[in-house]
Image: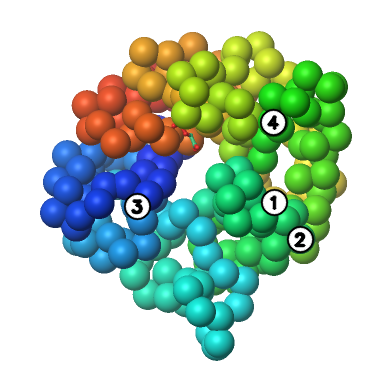
Amino acid sequence: MNKIIIANWKMNPQTEEEAINLAQDSDVEGLIICPPFPFLPAVKNSIRKATLGAQDMFWEESGAYTGEVSGPELQDLGVEYVIIGHSERRKNLSETDEMVAKKMEAAIRNDLVPILCIGETKEERDNNKTKEVLTRELTVGLGLIKNYTGEVIIAYEPIWAIGTGIPDTPENIIEMIQLIKETTEGFKSDSKVIYGGSVNSDNAEQFLQHEEIEGALVGGASLRSDEIKNIIKIAKKHG
Ligand code: PGA
């Protein structure tokens, strides 16, 4: 399967038992599962076909950083991918583009594939600021890894489409992906661009049928294994 499908469980579920059940039921080839930190070991032990991802990381390797989780710690748990700069962290924890850039660098230093999340608010879109926002998030966010030639995933996630049940249109997503590709032309990384925002098994085909949309970051729908399995089936059909 060429498409990248990522399950972002966010701060769900609430118990290890539920996490194990969901992981076992969602254990399909090609899926990257990003559970909350406390469930990483249990999920790792529950999957055979899926791959493990984390939802965040800190930019230092060790030391006096209360509450943070480092790249070596994630590596040790068998994590291969890491989401960086999700809009919920930017909003709730005031994560800046500069912090995101340091996390991107730390990810590649620790052999983790970074999933850089970018996207505009409704207000920014209405004020024709989308291009400006995406360009800033990309140039600053990737600024410390300009010469990196390995794999980087960029998730275009318009903030107003996250968790609202109202996804962006394929036409607009493709236009934004073209902008992202143009903006990242000078970077050497092997980057793939995926879409996130209210993707479910009913609408996934609309997006994944386009070769420009190289995958999906799925939040809410990834908490249901039947949903995620159907999304993977659709992804397989399209490359
Ligand atoms: P959603 O979340 O699928 O629930 O909209 C996507 C995301 O935040 O990555």
Residue 77: x and y in percent read: 34, 70
Question: Residue beneath label 4, please?
Answer: 121
Q: Farthest bottom residue?
A: 63
Question: Looking at mark 3, is its residue's CB closer than 8 Å to ligand 1?
Answer: no
The label number, if any, that marks residue 98 in the structure image = 2
* Distance from Cα at disc 4 to Cα at disc 1: 27 Å
Labelled pair 1, 2 in contact (Cβ < 8 Å) = no
First reached walking from the N terminus: tag 4 or tag 3: 3
Residue type at numbered disc 2: Glu
Image quadrant occupied by the N terminus: top left
Residue type at numbered disc 1: Ser
* Distance from Cα at disc 3 to Cα at disc 1: 26 Å
Residue drawn 36% across the image and 44% down it: 9
Give the vertical position of 110 relative to 199 (above or below): below
The label number, if any, that marks residue 189 in the structure image = 1
The residue mark sitting in front, 1 or 2, is 2
Q: Secondary structure under badge 2?
A: helix
* Distance from Cα at disc 4 to Cα at disc 3: 25 Å
Residue type at numbered disc 3: Pro
Give the vertical position of 160 relative to 12 (above or below): above
Give the vertical position of 2 relative to 40 (above or below): above
The label number, if any, that marks residue 35 in the structure image = 3
Labelled pair 4, 3 in contact (Cβ < 8 Å) = no
Residue 221: x and y in percent read: 35, 29
First reached walking from the N terminus: tag 3 or tag 1: 3
The residue mark sitting in front, 3 or 1, is 3
Residue type at numbered disc 4: Thr
